[in-house]
Image: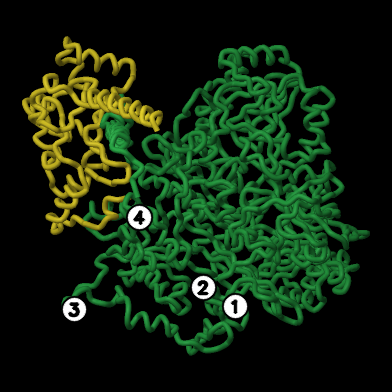
């Protein structure tokens, strides 16, 4: 009995330590987080700190100028490097981040962006359908034109989807499970 | 009682659980990355499928359409532009995609013994060897190649010395070509079509599976088997082993193997007497040729009753448009040429030459290699006169008869290079294996019938370093003799040759690629006179050799073919249509013969014939004649991954002597069968584990007077037929299976309807409001049982479309195969003229999308429910795996995931991203390809309309060669599916018993018998 207790004690200690380590790794310390990301919103670090505030806000580039597939496909698509280079061949070429983009383009190595809005694989979602129904990008993505660093505004939970579908039945939204579950 | 867990222990455990939970919730772990294009490719939109037309060696006379999404090939479909192929496709052809991603792909150059070497080293080695052999004998052995591909190979051997290029295919129709030369003086293979045939005789021909152009033939067969103006074609199968094609016949005459020629001669004699298609001199010639044949001798040779044979001859003579299909080459022995000559003459006498056997669309003999060439070449190799041998797309080490000693001959060759995409027995013998691009990654062309020129184009990029074989040939020759080839890329060679041959410009070339080739396939249908090659003494001295004892016949496997399909999970798991066996070799043996010999299902038999001995488990069957054994080709490999090396190699039993038809001798082989002490359980999908008699419980499967095997003797009418006379009679009243008239619904169903479930088709959702349950769409399917021939192509299509896993033999044996659609095979026996007549019925069974589904009511988590489009929806991530639904399903249409299945090789690249992957513990089933419905509705909505009839096809419907499946919106009264569902001979399976209100309707099979049932 005593041995068993010791073993369990060791397990508990191990568990607590690993929990602490995991928690420590998982949470971004509050002082390092960019101040603009609201508390508790998911905003992963990207390989290049691309600013939607600058491009979509200040410069007023329309969303679909870069996210060209949004009206044609399920996926809005992240623009190809070529698209970035269309402007940045000439613009702001002295900045280190732009140089990173140029280097990647020349090496023909795609930049691996981290998905901010990632739906489970068993869900079917089509950007095209929502855009052709007349929804603005901001209705789901939040005030994207003000975001220095993109965060996930919507919870992307089933209840959140269904609520919106329910209130848009007249627009042809459906609340059948198979509309989204594939 | 004191609890044994103490507070401290509890806390410790809690801590552990907490840590585990935190680990599980780590957001970083589920982070997904996205790699966008560097430079976008024009026209490619993420998640949007594109289709590319191509062709493959496996479907030489056909064309393929490959679905590609985000740069990955996902599914192989039929090319509707292709005149021979059409939209349907065989199960085998669909499995091409599995060889693209399979684990047997060669990924780096290798020395013998699978020792990996670098590309540089391999190149150096090839260069060295070719330089040393330059001017001597550098030969090539390939599969059949045509057009510019053939030119490259010929020039390659020509540039390097005095070697030759030999084409070899394990299955060839060179016998038929030689017979055409003999009878009509035309050295080519005519195009066989079943169009407009009203009387068809097949003599063991697997024309719906492997022989000729099975997809087109199945389509035509489906057409002639439906009623047009009160008539339907009759089909008589004369064969010892009932093939899947023969199983569809109205009459099965179980003739002894080896008697095909005598029967054909007797029929010829009978038909020719009053034939209008023969001139006087031709009649005289035929009269002389058949002088020795009589009804009695033919009937006794065949072991058939004389009346039956006479009746057949009589019917054939009076048929308007009759056609007789010759026996399979593997069935024919030394009389191979005699048989084909007799059948061609018979067709000539029937007037079928020109009408159904079309020489104006013939195929050139260069596309049909005879085995003589390869036999001679192996002899040359054995002499040691070949210095360097290059092998591609041929597996002689596996499929040549063992008597030819290919292995020894190969060891005498100076250096052997195998250009291969996958490992096989031959690559394992080669000194150097060089990976080349797969068929779906290559350029090429296939010339087959006159007017059919199919193009092969790569549909995706190669995933690792490998090159098109022809590019390598060009590179090697140009390195030795610069400028031998002007174009250094085979693509340009092909393009230039094709553009010159058909005088195309750039846009014409692009259009040809888009369509899949250049097609100009119109038959002129002229009849030909009998040529002078045939002399009156051709049959003189001909004696049929028919063994009275046990004989073994070989047949080309529907699934494994010449063996190249055997390392594909879909093919191994696809049940043999007649016996339901998966994953193994088996020898089919008649049930009564087996009983006499004390053989039971699963006994391993030793079968000894002149060519060798094999040990195979026995499959007891009622669809094979007494004293006949049947073994199919394609299994018995040694070079694939371990789980695909199964069973025995039937080719090893072939005789090394090339017969009169230019093929390695097969035919019926006298066999000695002894029972060994071993037993092996076969994995069969027809009632697994039932035992010796494999029958299906839902139908009448007992022979008259036999005791019941299962606990019920009720024929539940799941499969129904209607006699032609009854079908045509407007006043006909349907009778039950025992001749008793029964009402449309059973009492049980009526009770249910009145008391239990509302009829969603009619009942208003809310009383007083004009609103029914279904609004715009109610998706329904219809299957025409007169057209379905049991080929099982739908099963493979479903595997490809819906990400179904391959489970392996052990799981199939436990009934855990995952196919969402299966083809039930029912056997019926009836007594006729003192004989037991065997009838076979095929019925595709998938989820019936019941309106009153038994499964829905029992689901505790609402994972399955009836949706407003008539689908029995299944939400996978909601399922908790109680399996109540499967237990309650009337049709056994639900499948449970007992495991998470790992896919070997890169096979997960094939997965359709439109369909969820189901994990362990989840129930799954057919949902009428809801992903296809979704995208069709999406497209329709873009244009502000409803989905049009015929716009959306399910995967099974699309693949069905016979076009037996229709699909559409029942709410649209003009739709095909609505009209078929309300046809006179439509029914819904078991609805009259259980009132499940299925969304699938079947059209009863129209039979020529007077009875109407199954």
Colour yellow, chain: A
Q: Residues within 10 Å of mark 1 (few under 14, many from 20)?
A: some
Q: Which chain carries label 2?
A: B
Pointers 2 and 3 in contact (CB under 8 A)? no
Gap in angstroms between the C-alphas marked 2 and 1: 14 Å
Q: Which one is closest to the eye, mark 2 or mark 1?
A: 1
Residue B1007 placement (x, y as % from top left):
59, 76
Residue found at x 31% / y 57%: B861
Instruction: Using residue B494 as the reference point, say whether residue B344 is left or right of it.
Output: right
Q: How crowded is mark 3: few (under 14 residues within 10 Å), some or many (20 or more)?
A: few
Residue placed under numbered mark 4 in the picture: B930
Mark 4 and mark 2 on one chain: yes
Q: Chain B is drawn in which colour?
A: green
Residue placed under numbered mark 1 in the picture: B713
The quarter in which the C terminus of chain B is drawn is bottom right
Give the number of the disc on residue B525: none
Gap in angstroms between the C-alphas marked 2 and 3: 35 Å
Q: Which chain carries label 3?
A: B
């Amino acid at each position: 009995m005593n041995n068993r207790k010791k073993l369990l004690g060791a397990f508990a200690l191990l568990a607590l330590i690993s929990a602490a380590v995991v928690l420590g790794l998982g949470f971004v310390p509050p002082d390092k987080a960019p101040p603009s990301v609201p508390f508790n919103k998911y905003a992963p670090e990207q390989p290049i700190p691309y600013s939607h505030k600058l491009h979509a806000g200040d410069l007023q580039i329309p969303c679909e100028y870069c996210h060209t597939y949004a009206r044609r496909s399920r996926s809005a698509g992240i623009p190809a490097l070529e698209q970035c280079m269309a402007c940045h061949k000439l613009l702001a070429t002295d900045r280190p981040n732009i140089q990173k983009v140029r280097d990647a383009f020349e090496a023909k190595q795609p930049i691996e962006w981290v998905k901010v809005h990632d739906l489970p694989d068993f869900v079917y979602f089509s950007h095209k359908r929502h855009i052709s129904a007349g929804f603005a990008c901001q209705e789901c993505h939040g005030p994207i034109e003000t975001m220095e660093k993109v965060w996930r505004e919507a919870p992307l939970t089933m209840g959140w989807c269904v609520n919106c579908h329910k209130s848009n039945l007249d627009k042809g939204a459906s609340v059948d499970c198979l509309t989204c579950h594939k | 009682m004191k609890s044994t867990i103490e507070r401290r222990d509890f806390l410790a455990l809690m801590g552990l659980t907490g840590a585990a939970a935190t680990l599980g919730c780590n957001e970083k772990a589920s982070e997904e990355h996205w790699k966008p294009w560097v430079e976008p490719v024009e026209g490619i939109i993420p998640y949007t499928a594109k289709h590319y037309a191509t062709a493959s060696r496996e479907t030489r006379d056909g064309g393929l359409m490959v679905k590609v999404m985000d740069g990955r090939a996902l599914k192989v479909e039929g090319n509707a532009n292709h005149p021979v192929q059409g939209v349907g496709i065989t199960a085998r052809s669909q499995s091409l995609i599995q060889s693209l991603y399979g684990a047997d792909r060669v990924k780096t150059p290798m020395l013998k013994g699978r020792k990996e070497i670098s590309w540089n080293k391999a190149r150096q080695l090839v260069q060295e060897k070719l330089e040393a052999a330059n001017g001597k004998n550098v030969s090539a052995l390939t599969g059949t190649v045509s057009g510019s591909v053939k030119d490259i190979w010929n020039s390659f051997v020509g540039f390097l010395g005095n070697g030759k290029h030999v084409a070899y295919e394990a299955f060839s129709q060179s016998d038929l070509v030689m017979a055409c030369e003999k009878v009509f003086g035309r050295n080519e293979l005519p195009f066989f079509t079943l169009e407009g045939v009203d009387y068809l005789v097949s003599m063991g021909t697997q024309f719906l599976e492997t022989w000729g152009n099975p997809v087109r033939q199945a389509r035509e067969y489906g057409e002639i088997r439906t009623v047009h103006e009160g008539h339907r074609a009759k089909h008589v199968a004369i064969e010892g082993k009932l093939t899947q094609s023969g199983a569809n016949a109205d009459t099965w005459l179980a003739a002894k193997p080896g008697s095909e020629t005598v029967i054909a001669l007797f029929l010829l004699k009978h038909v020719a007497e009053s034939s209008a298609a023969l001139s006087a001199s031709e009649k005289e010639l035929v009269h002389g040729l058949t002088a020795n044949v009589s009804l009695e001798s033919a009937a006794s040779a065949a072991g058939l009753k004389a009346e039956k044979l006479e009746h057949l001859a009589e019917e054939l003579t009076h048929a308007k448009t009759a056609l007789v299909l010759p026996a399979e080459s593997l069935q024919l022995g030394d009389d191979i040429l005699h048989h084909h000559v007799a059948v061609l003459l018979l067709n000539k006498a029937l007037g079928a030459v020109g009408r159904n056997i079309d020489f104006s669309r013939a195929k050139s003999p260069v596309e049909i290699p005879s085995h003589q060439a390869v036999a001679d070449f192996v002899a040359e190799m054995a002499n040691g006169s070949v210095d360097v041998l290059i092998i591609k797309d041929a597996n002689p080490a596996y499929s040549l008869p063992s008597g030819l000693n290919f292995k020894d001959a190969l060891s005498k060759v100076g250096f052997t290079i195998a250009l291969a995409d996958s490992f096989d027995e031959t690559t394992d013998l080669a000194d150097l294996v060089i990976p080349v691009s797969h068929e779906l990654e290559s350029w090429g062309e296939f010339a087959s019938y006159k007017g059919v020129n199919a193009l092969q184009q790569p549909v995706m990029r190669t995933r690792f370093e490998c090159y098109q074989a022809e590019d390598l040939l060009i590179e090697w020759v140009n390195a030795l003799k610069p400028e031998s080839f002007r174009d250094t890329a085979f693509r340009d060679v092909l393009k230039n040759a094709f553009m010159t041959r058909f005088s195309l410009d750039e846009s014409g070339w692009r259009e040809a690629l888009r369509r899949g080739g250049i097609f100009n396939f119109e038959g002129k249908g002229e009849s030909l006179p009998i040529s002078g090659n045939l002399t009156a003494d051709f049959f003189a001295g001909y004696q049929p050799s028919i063994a009275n004892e046990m004989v073994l016949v070989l047949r080309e496997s529907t699934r494994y073919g010449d063996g190249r399909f055997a390392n594909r999970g879909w093919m191994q798991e696809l049940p043999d249509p007649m016996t339901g066996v998966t994953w193994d070799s088996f020898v089919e043996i008649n049930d009564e013969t087996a009983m006499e010999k004390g053989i039971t299902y699963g006994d391993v038999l030793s079968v000894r014939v002149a060519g060798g001995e094999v040990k195979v488990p026995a499959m007891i069957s009622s669809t094979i004649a007494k004293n006949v054994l049947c073994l199919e080709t394609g299994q018995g490999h040694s070079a694939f991954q371990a789980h695909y090396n199964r069973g025995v190699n039937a080719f090893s039993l072939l005789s090394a002597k090339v017969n009169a038809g230019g093929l390695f001798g097969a035919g019926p082989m006298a066999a000695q069968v002894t029972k060994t002490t071993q037993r092996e359980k076969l994995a069969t999908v027809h009632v697994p584990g039932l035992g010796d008699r494999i029958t299906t419980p839902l139908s009448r499967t007992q022979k008259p007077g036999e005791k019941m095997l299962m606990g019920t003797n009720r024929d539940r009418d799941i499969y129904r037929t209607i006699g032609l006379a009854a079908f045509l009679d407007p006043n006909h009243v349907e009778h039950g299976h025992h001749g008793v008239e029964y009402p449309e619904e059973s009492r049980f169903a009526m009770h249910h309807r009145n008391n239990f479930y509302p009829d969603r088709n009619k009942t208003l959702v809310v009383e007083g409001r004009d609103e029914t349950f279904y609004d715009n769409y109610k998706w329904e399917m219809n299957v025409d049982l007169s057209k379905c021939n049991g080929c099982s192509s739908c099963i493979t299509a479903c595997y490809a479309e819906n990400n179904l896993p391959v489970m392996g033999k052990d799981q199939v044996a436990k009934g855990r195969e995952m196919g969402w659609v299966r083809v039930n095979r029912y056997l019926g026996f009836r007594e006729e003229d003192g004989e037991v007549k065997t009838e076979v019925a095929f019925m595709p069974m998938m989820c019936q999308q019941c309106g009153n589904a038994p499964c829905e009511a029992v689901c505790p988590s609402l994972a399955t429910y009836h949706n407003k489009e008539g689908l029995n929806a299944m939400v996978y991530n909601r399922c908790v795996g109680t399996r109540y639904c499967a237990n309650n399903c009337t049709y056994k249409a639900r499948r449970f995931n007992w495991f998470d299945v790992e896919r070997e090789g890169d096979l997960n690249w094939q997965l359709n991203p439109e369909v969820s992957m189901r994990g362990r513990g989840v129930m799954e089933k057919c949902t009428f390809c809801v992903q296809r419905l979704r995208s069709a509705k999406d497209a329709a909505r873009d244009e502000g309309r409803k989905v049009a009839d015929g716009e959306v096809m399910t995967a099974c419907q699309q693949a069905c060669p016979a076009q037996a499946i229709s699909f559409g919106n029942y709410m649209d009264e003009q739709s095909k599916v609505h009209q078929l569902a309300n046809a006179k001979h439509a029914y819904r399976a078991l609805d009259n018993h259980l009132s499940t209100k299925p969304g699938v309707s079947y059209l009863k099979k129209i039979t020529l018998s007077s009875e109407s049932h199954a």
